Amino acid sequence: MKKTFSILIASISFSATYSQNKQEDIKSIKQMCGCYEVEFNFTETFQATKDTTHKPSPTKKDHGLEWVELVEDSSNKLVLQHLLIVNDEMIIKHWRQDWLYENTEFYQFFKDKTWKFEKLAPKDVKGQWTQKVYQVDDSPRYEGTATWIHEDGKDYWMNVTDAPLPRREHTIRKDYNVLERRNIHEITKYGWLHEQDNRKLVRDENGNDTEIAQEKGLDLYVKVEDSKCAAAQKWWKENGKMWKNVREKWQSVFDQDKTIELEKSVDNKPLFSHLFDLKPTATKEETDKIIDSFIK
C-alpha cells in the first residue's frame, strides 16, 4: 500500500513539474512577439571540400524592422507571424513559426522541394515543443522538436534539423542542396536571438550526404516600442483573413500524412509571387487553386 501511495505521489509531482515547465515555455515563446529592430549576420566558416574552385558565399550583414504577430494562442499551439517593414511603409510577409507541444507528426526536408512525413512515438517528445518554420507563402520549410531549457539564468531552445537553402543562398549557390541547421532561440534582456551553426550538404537520392562547408549565423532581435511597427499591425488587420485561408489550405495538405513534393514555379512564377499578387479580398477558392497548382 505504501509503495502504491509513493508511486502516486511521485506521479503527481512529475505531472506538476511538466505543467510548470510548460507555462515557462509558453511565456518564453510569447516573448518573441512584438516589435524588433533586427540584425542579420551570416558568414561561411570552414571549407570541407578539397575542390580548389569552391568559392564561399560573401559575408552577409543586414538589418530591418520586424513585427511578430501572435496569430494563434492555445495551450498546445502558438503561431507567430513575422512581418518585415521596409522604408517605414512597405510590408513584406516574412517567415512564420508555429510552436506545438508534444507534437508527433513531422514533415522532414529531404531535398529538392521534397518533405517526407515522419511520425514519432509520444514518449520521444514528452515535454518537448516542435518549432515548425514556414516559407513566406506558408509552404513548409523545416521543423524540429526539443525541450525548452530554463536553467542557470539561461532561457533557450535548441534543435538540429535539415532545411532548404535560404533565400540569401539559393539565388547564388548551386553546389549544395541541403542546409543542416543547428538552431538556438534564446530569450535575452534586450529581446531574443536566433543563433545558427549550419552545415552545407550535397545529398543524393539515397540520402547520402557530403559536406562542403559550414556557416555561422546570428540574428539579433532588439525590442522596441510596438508603435514603431504600427504599419505592420495595420497591414495584418487588412490581410490576415486571406492568409488564414492559405494556412488552412496548407493544413489540409499536411493532414494527408504523406510526402509533399512541390513545383519550383508555375507559369514562370514561384508560389510566393502568385500569392503576393493577390488582393486582401481574394477568396479561399482563389488561394486554394494557386496552392493546388504547385503540389505534384
Image (tube, rainbow, N blue to C red):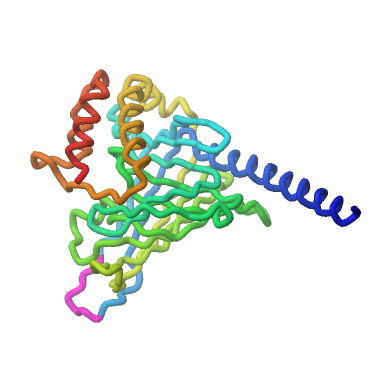
Query: Residue 56 falls in which quadrant of the image?
Result: bottom left
Q: Is residue 151 left or right of residue 293?
A: right
Please identify the dominant SS of the magenta region: loop
Q: Does residue 241 sit above or below 251 in this rendering?
A: above
Q: Name the residue nearer the viewer: 40 or 211.
A: 211
Q: Residue at x 42, y 63 (%)?
A: 197
Q: Which stretch is magenta? A: 50-56
- Seen in the picture, residue 87 relative to 201 is either above or below; the reply is above
Residue 30: x and y in percent read 54, 37
Q: Is residue 79 left or right of residue 164?
A: right
Query: What is the quadrant of residue 245 in the picture?
Result: top left
Residue 265 % position (x, y)? 14, 44
Check if residue 10 falls in the magenta segment: no
Position in image of residue 132 (x %, y %)? 42, 46
Closer to us: 256 or 136: 256
* Residue at 79 percent of width and 52 percent of height: 10
**Residue found at the far left of this picture:** 267
Residue 273 image point, x, y percent: 18, 36
